[in-house]
Image (cartoon, grey):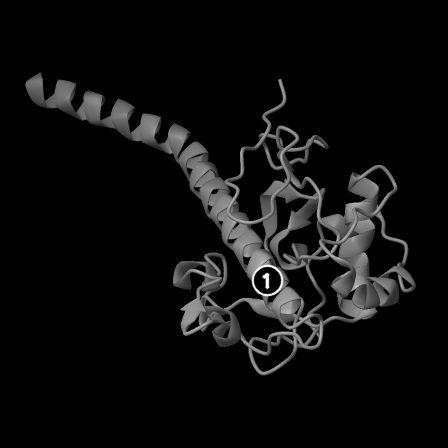
Amino acid sequence: MTLIAVMAVMAIFAVALLAVAPTIATEIQRERELEAIARGEEVADAIRQYVEFYRGAKLPNSMDDLLEGLPEGSRTRQILRPSAAIDPLSKDGKWRLIPADGKSLAPFAKSVQAFNGGLLPSNPSRMFDRWAIVIVNSLNTETESDKTAPVEEDVEILTENTPFIGVASQDRGKSIVAYYGIENHSKWIFTPLFRGTGVSMQPGGGAANAPMNGVPFPGNAEPKPVFPD
């Protein structure tokens, strides 16, 4: 009888574990996504500092350019933590580098525009306007389904040796967190262009179109998602 009782308890325990497993997996995925956003925003701010330091004359060519920092007298000013240079969603940990062209950035700019009530947020300084004009002039239409679809398979994945103004994950998975209303990791672009409020989430994988407590994401701001009732 004791053996039967123990087996029954173990069976109940196993069923309980199976019931909570999806919740645990979802929570782990959500934390990874929020960490990716936090790191991506750090990269975006480092790009901003880099471009402003060189007065818009050049863009970084690799993550090493950001990790090396900027000269400040006889010292070097660090603008990016080593951990932020690693994408927690990509298998190899490398960010996909986003060049400053309309084809790469227009779909993201369109999502930001829609999320921001039809207006694109201003740039951090006029040094970014020359790239923003190109992007704005190439804005295309995007359906709601485009916000969950991954970047096309034939898009070239650049991770080094190219001038870039933003980064994105190589992972093509659908997200739990929505970043500017976008629910696919590969379409989240972290760039100093078009800054504004960005993340919202809804249990079950949907997006709640609400800002993160009204707090924008520049620099090292920690994401504080809004959970709808």
Residue 122 image position (x, y, % from top left): 79, 49
Give the residue furthest to the front: 73
| Residue at x 88% of width, y 41% of height | 118
Q: Quadrant of residue 20?
A: top left
User: Where on the picture, by quarter, is residue 155?
Assistant: bottom right
> Would you place residue 5 above or below residue 14 in this image?
above
Q: In this view of the protein, which residue sits in the foreground, 134 or 152?
A: 134
Locate the N terminus by quadrant.
top left
Crowding around mark 1 (Cα neighbors within 10 Å: few <14, some 14 to 19, many 20+) is: some
The answer to which image quadrant residue 168 occupies is bottom right
Q: Amino acid at mark 1?
A: Gln
- Residue 31 as seen in the image, left or right of residue 135: left
Relative horizontal placement of residue 91, taking residue 118 as reference (left or right)? left
Picture coordinates of residue 194 (x, y %)?
A: 75, 52
State the residue in front, 9 or 225. Answer: 225
Residue 73: x and y, percent?
A: 46, 72
Q: Could you tell me which residue is drawn at 59 percent across and 54 percent down? A: 173
Number of numbered labels in the structure image:
1
Name the one closer to the observer, 12 or 195.
195
SS for callout 1 = helix
115 sits left or right of 141 in the view: left
Q: Residue furthest left?
A: 2
Q: Quadrant of the C terminus?
A: top right
Residue at 26% across / 26% down in the picture? 13
Q: Which residue is under mark 1?
A: 49
100 w.r.t. 129: above or below:
below
